[in-house]
Each structure stands twice: as structure tokens, then as C-alpha cells.
Image (cartoon, grey):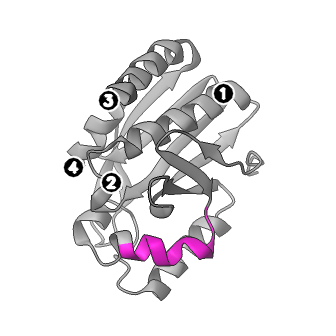
Amino acid sequence: MTAKLPVPVTLTGRHVRLEPLTRAHVPDLFEAAGGDEEVWRWIPVPVPRTEQELRETNDARIADERCLPFAVIRLATGRAVGVTCYFDFSAEDELLEIGGTWYGRSAWRTEVNTEAKLLLLEHAFGELGMGRVCWKTDHLNERSQNAIRRLGASYEGTFRRAKRRPDGSWRDSVWFSMLKDEWPAASARLSERLAAG
């Protein structure tokens, strides 16, 4: 039985706003990353070549009962530059996953991902009362693994032959997690990084 997802919310920081993903975000998202092979390289869906294909990808995320997807809006422009999600929420076990994250190249190596994850983690550990947040990524996706480590997450292990890629090959999934008692130190580091610009 699928656990009930948390109530959709909007989370706002200094640089980004996370709001529930809708079809209205598709034009911005397509402009940010439509057809970009490198953006979609590690996302387990075919590369969207048209707005309609991206709309279908987003519709699938929105319809997924395990997923609460957010559009990531850059406050300076008011435009959506990517997507990030909560998955597999369990109030009983106090855990959830953050994943399904992608950004257009203009957001790479900027404050966007750092602040988006800070907002998601603050909400997860604070308002939602989670005790554990996890991430999973392709074993070949070193950029994602490094970004997760920079958040302060701990490597837990690698699940071999865990998921089929769109091209039919198999990926190993690298797991990371952060526990509630690790969050205050991680939050301080992330906040310092954002303040330093």
C-alpha cells in the first residue's frame, strides 16, 4: 500500500522558490533543458525533444502516487529552471527520498541546487518530522554523487543492477542518507555556503 504523500507546499528562499509542479511550468522547463542530452543523461526517461514530450514526462511525475514533484523557480527571473521531488514518504517510519532532480545548464554550479536542497531538508526534518532522508543515483553519475556528498549526506552502499536505463542497460544505484541528528551541522554548512555566494 502506498503511503499518503505530504500536503503540497511552496518553499521560498533567497534565490529559489519550490512550488508544486504543474503543466504551466512546461514552457520554461523546455526552454531551460528541452532536448539537452547532458541534462537528461541520468534521468530514467527518454530525452524530451518537444514541449509535448516534456509535458508527458511531467504529467507522469505528477500522476505518480509515490512522488511529490516541485518546479524550481529562480527568483531573479521568475522562471522555472528545473525539477526536484520527494519520493516514498512514510510518516510511520519517518523517512523519505529526495530525487528526480534535474536543472537546465544555466543553473549548474550555482546556488540553485544548494538552496533547493536546503529548503527540502528543512521542510523534511522540521515540518514533516522525518528521521531519515535518502538519495539514490546512478553509479556512473559522479556529478550527482559529488553534489549529494556536498550536502553532508553519508554513503550507505551500492545496489547492483538496481534499475534499467532508457537505453536498456542496467545501472547500479548508489545510496546516500542524512539522519535528523546530522541535520543541524549540515544545515549550518549549507547556510554558510549560500551566504558566501
Q: Is residue 184 magenta?
A: no
Q: Amino acid at mark 3?
A: Arg
Q: Secondary structure at mark 3?
A: helix
Give the spatial CA distance, label 2 vs label 1.
28 Å
Label 4 vs label 1, nearer the camera: 1
Tell me the magenta residue range.
21-31
Main secondary structure of the magenta stretch: helix
**What residue is rendered at 56% in x and 49% in y?**
17
Identify the disc placed on residue 107. 2
Mark toward the start of the polypeptide (4 vs 1): 1
Mark 4 or mark 3, which has the lower sequence index?
4
Residue that label 1 marks = 130
Q: What is the spatial separation of the Cα atoms under label 4 and label 3, in whole angstroms?
A: 15 Å
Mark-to-mark CA distance, 4 and 1: 29 Å
Residue 53, position in %: x, y?
A: 46, 84
Image position, residue 183 (x, y; %): 52, 18
Instruction: Tell me the CA gap for discs 4 and 2.
Output: 21 Å
Q: Is residue 22 on the magenta stretch? A: yes
Residue 5 left/right relative to 71: right
Q: Secondary structure at mark 4?
A: loop
Asked whether the beta carbons under mark 1 and mark 3 sit within 8 Å of each other, the answer is no
According to the picture, the residue beneath numbered tag 3 turns out to be 149
Does dot 2 land on a helix, a strand or a loop?
Answer: helix
User: Is 23 left or right of 43, judged from the image as shown?
Assistant: right
Give me the disc on residue 140.
Answer: 4
What amino acid type should be assigned to the residue bearing mark 1? Met
Q: Nearer the viewer, residue 82 or 163?
A: 82
Q: Is residue 112 left or right of residue 19?
A: left
Are the residues flagged by discs 2 and 3 in contact, CB closer than 8 Å?
Answer: no
Instruction: Give residue 189's position: percent from left, percent from top.
Output: 39, 19
